[in-house]
Image: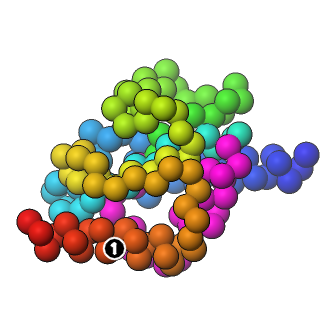
Amino acid sequence: MIKMKLLLMMSLFFFSSGEWQHNLEDAKKIAGTDHKYILLNFSGSDWCGPCIRMRKEIFEVDVFKKMADTELILVNADFPRNKKNQPSVSQQKTNDEMADLYNRKGIFPYTLLLDSQGKVLKTWEGFPDESAESFTLDIRNEMYTIKNTR
């Protein structure tokens, strides 16, 4: 029980930290100004095992964090189930709007690479079957390919 509470607190801290945005429209503005891509992640931070695993094994790994700091705007749309973890009404509305646009099937985790206008460039359903290093390289390769074809 204590481990579960600690894991929950850590997951809520991670997704409420300053490096993750929670509004796609704000992220698009930042991405356009900074010439970055957007990584949008749909998660269930207090119930989805693969979501928690993705956070720990990919998003919190230094190789991913270093790349994300310089090349991505990170956006998290979290859908917790526990009453005490529910987002504000306005944040829930924002999350629902993002899901209506990008995750109608309700897949968790679901991760999308978007351009600054919100165009989908690549998607990952569920936990990626690769290391943080490979996932990071996959994103970099996609961004490199796009930059060189425009």
Q: Is residue 46 left or right of residue 129?
A: right
Look at 66% across and 58% down and name the residue there.
Answer: 53
Q: Position of residue 51 (x, y in %)?
A: 62, 50
**What's drawn in magenta, residue-wise?**
48-75
Q: Is residue 113 left or right of residue 133?
A: left
Residue 57 within the magenta-colored segment of the rendering: yes
Up-down relation of residue 117 to residue 68 (above or below): above
Q: Position of residue 26 (x, y in %)?
A: 28, 43
Q: Position of residue 95 (x, y in %)?
A: 44, 32
Look at 48% across and 26% down and name the residue there.
Answer: 92
Q: Position of residue 29 (x, y in %)?
A: 20, 47
Amino acid on which the number 1 mark rests in the picture: Arg
Dot 1, crowdedness within 10 Å: few (<14), some or many (≥20)? some
From the image, tell me which residue sits under label 1: 140
Task: Work out which quarter of the rendered image holds the C terminus and state it.
Answer: bottom left
Q: Nearer the viewer, residue 141 or 19?
A: 141
Is any part of residue 50 visible from this angle? yes
Look at 12% across and 69% down and name the residue there.
Answer: 149
Count of numbered marks: 1
Q: Is residue 33 left or right of residue 45?
A: left
Q: Is residue 127 left or right of residue 47?
A: left
